[in-house]
Amino acid sequence: MIGGVIITKETNQFNFLVVDDEANIRRMLAICLETEGYQVTAVSNFDDALSEASRKSFDIAFVDLRLGTATGLDLIPALLAVTPWLKIVVITAYASIETAVDAIKRGAADYLPKPFTPAQVKLAIHKIFDIRNLEQKVTDLREDLGRSNFEADFSSASAAMTRAVNLAQQTAPSNATILIRGESGTGKTVLAKAIHGWSGRQTMPFGVISCPSLSPELLESELFGHVKGAFTGAVRDNPGRISMCNRGTLLLDEIGDLPLSLQPKLLRFVQEKEYERIGDYTTRQADVRIIAATNIDLEKSVRDGRFREDLYYRLNVISIEIPPLRERPDDIVSLANGLLIFFGKSCHKTLSGFTDEALRLLNSYPWPGNVRELRNIVERAVILCAGNKIAADHLPENLHATPAAIRIGDPVSLNKIEEEHIRRVLASTRSLQDAADLLGIDQATLWRRRKQYGI
């Protein structure tokens, strides 16, 4: 800690832009910053500053107010349009209250009059770090106040779940691309956030893009960004999630739904860390760790021509499989109790647990919606409960109507096992065709089986 400012490894990796038409000032600032371990790019004019900012990602910029025939005041909004998170320190030999106020109004974070000393430069940097630390604290507090998700608890009696978490913890400190597999609701996003938190990127942004939720055009814009006027409705520049997550982590949720037209562009970014915004031919670079998540069989999508084989191998560097909740029966009660405490606090209720009958119903249900479904059911029960224990009548009807889940080796007929398997596959896939493909039968056969078993 220096002067109350937290100095971290990530802090020393910050990129600085120096814009001044005086060579001596550029040289002095560059030496001052580089001796502190920072990376510095120094330019002499307005156009070069914008050119560098369009190619690289900067954290802090020192900008002179007089740049030949141009003015640094106009450069401030231009730089912020390219890099919204950039902190700008204005430097000038013509200091006045009016210019200081004008610079702050245009988006500058601080003001440094010439002549200045290396100590004053370091103080200005530390003030910027203070601002960033406070902004991060505000962001964290907002997330805490708005958080509606149960905090991740990865303790498990399941060997498969324990292996998945151990692998995630082991690989989190690396920069390797990770592919998280699992049915909908198993907690792929929660695990991805945990990996980010366990990594050296934890103080940097974490972003999520849901691939099925946007059209191909909007998805490309959300991922890579666009410039104003690139298409109808593009009324302002959008830096894109890749740019916003620089030195952080980006989760591509349900990557199997990424349109084929975007897959070569994503492949290029994963390989080269380079990309272009829509409507702009400038090649940009970003250091973003990619985590992909899927609930479908990507290998089958590759065989069917719906997913590029080269992209699949690039994403599948580390593969982590999250088992469905029905394969973790010993975790159901512990997860339910954790959710009970969480929602009890949210609803200002003191609850001591579940009745024996309620626990029996929770344990006998096959949980096609996995942990997400369990979360919703416990939240509903807490809201409905007027006593101090969750009873069977606080649980939805589908739990009461469900027979005990069948496991391989139980004393039941093959027909019962087939029926249970078909039910689970139907619950975990998005269409009858997907279910038939997974079962290895055609849709007509699946239709007859459903009719036979009353599914």
Image (cartoon, rainbow, N blue to C red):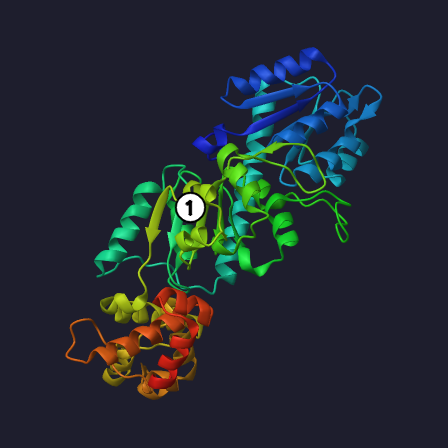
On the question of residue 386 being in view, the answer is no
Quadrant containing the C terminus is: bottom left
* Residue receiving disc 1: 196
Pick the residue in front: 137 or 162.
162
Which residue appears at 58% of the width and 40% of the height? Answer: 131
When the figure is inspected, residue 297 is found, relative to residue 124, above or below; the finding is below
Which residue appears at 14% of the width and 79% of the height? Answer: 411
Q: Is residue 405 left or right of residue 294?
A: left
Which residue appears at 35% of the width and 44% of the height? Answer: 318
- Mark 1 closeness class: few <14, some 14–19, many ≥20 residues within 10 Å: many
- Within the image, what quadrant is residue 413 found in? bottom left
When the figure is inspected, residue 113 is found, relative to residue 204, above or below; the finding is above
Q: Is residue 379 left or right of residue 366?
A: right
Q: Amino acid at mark 1?
A: His
Q: Position of residue 363 (x, y in %)?
A: 26, 76
Q: Position of residue 371 (x, y in %)?
A: 36, 67
Quadrant containing the N terminus is: top left
- Within the image, what quadrant is residue 313 found in? top left
Which residue appears at 52% of the width and 32% of the height? Answer: 272
Q: Position of residue 121 (x, y in %)?
A: 60, 23
On the question of residue 135 being in view, the answer is yes
Q: Is residue 10 left or right of residue 151?
A: right
When the figure is inspected, residue 344 is found, relative to residue 20, above or below; the finding is below
- Local SS, label 1: helix
Q: Position of residue 219 (x, y in %)?
A: 61, 52
